[in-house]
Image (spheres, grey):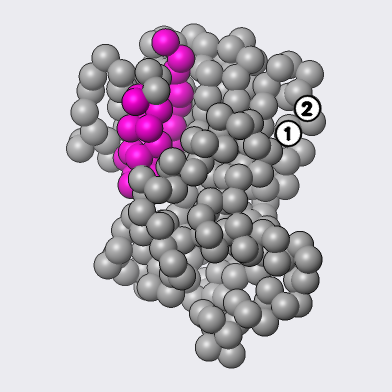
Amino acid sequence: MRTALISGGGGGLGRALAVGLQARGWRCILLDLDVAGLERTAQQMAIPCDLTDAAQRDAAVARALEASPAIDLVIHAAGITHIGPFAEQDESALRRLFEVNFFAATALTRAMLAPVRAARGTHLAISSVAGFSPLYHRTAYAASKHAIEGFFGSLRSEERAHGVDVLIAAPSFVATNGGHRAGADGIARPGSAPDGIDAMTPEAAARAILKGYERQAAMIPVGRVAHLAWRLNRLSPGLFRYLMQRRIGGA
C-alpha cells in the first residue's frame, strides 16, 4: 500500500485529497493544527502538529516515519492567506504568511527528503494562481506562493537524480472556508476570499490535482480560471493584469 503525507490534512482540500487517494488504495497520514474531526482507520492516520514549531514538526515526522519509513507522496497543502492592501499591512502579517506558507513547507520537505527518495516518490506543492501571476490585495500571499513555486521548481532538478518527482498544483479559488472572515491583521483561512471568481469545490479541485499527479505534470493549473490565467499571463502579462484588476480590483 502506497503512503501519502498531507500537511493541512484537516482542511477542506486536504481532506478531499485524502479521500481521493484512499479511493485509489492509498494510506494517508494527515498533519494539521486540529485533527479532532479526522477519522483514524487502517487507511488514515492523523497527527496534530503546528508545522511552524520545530519540536512539534520533528515529533510528527518521527511518528509518521515510524508508521511508514518510506513515503511515496508528500502533499504540501498547509497554508493561510492574507487579504488587504499592502499600505495597511502589518509587517508581522507578511512574516506570518512566510512562516506558514513557505518556511514550514521547506522544513517539512527537508525532513522528508530521505523517505521520499527511498520510495522514489513525489513532492506535490499546493501553490495558487497567485504563485505565478499578480493578484489584487494579495501582496503577502502572492509573495509566499511565488517563493513556493521558485523553491519547488528549483528542487525538481536536484531531486531528479534520486528518482523523485516534484510537482506544483496551482488552484484558482477553492471554496473551503466560505463565510470565514479575516482577522484584524488581514490573515484568513484559505478558501475564504469574498472576491473569489468561479470558485471550485474541494472535491473538484482534488480530482484535478490527483489527475495531474497521475500524469506527473510538472505544473497543474487547477480549474477553468487557473488554466485561463496560466495561459494568458504567459502570453500577455499586461492584459492579464488589466483584466484581473477590472474583475476583482474594481479598477
Residue at the image point whose x is 59% and y is 51% from the top: 221
Q: Which residues are magenta?
A: 1-23
Q: Amino acid at mark 2?
A: Glu
- Above or below, 58 relative to 241: above
Query: Which one is nearer the viewer's eye here, 222 or 76?
Result: 222
Q: Quadrant of the C terminus?
A: bottom right
Within the magenta stretch, is there residue 12? yes
Within the magenta stretch, is there residue 219? no
Query: Which one is nearer the viewer's eye here, 199 or 114?
Result: 199
Q: Amino acid at mark 1?
A: Leu
Helix, strand or loop at label 1? It is helix
Left or right, 228 with respect to 194, comes to right
Q: Residues within 10 Å of mark 2 (few under 14, many from 20)?
A: some
Q: Is residue 78 in view from this perspective?
A: no
Q: Which residue is mark 1?
A: 155
Residue 144, given in percent of the width and then of the height, sits at: 61, 55
Residue 191, given in percent of the width and then of the height, sits at: 39, 59
Q: Quadrant of the N terminus?
A: top left
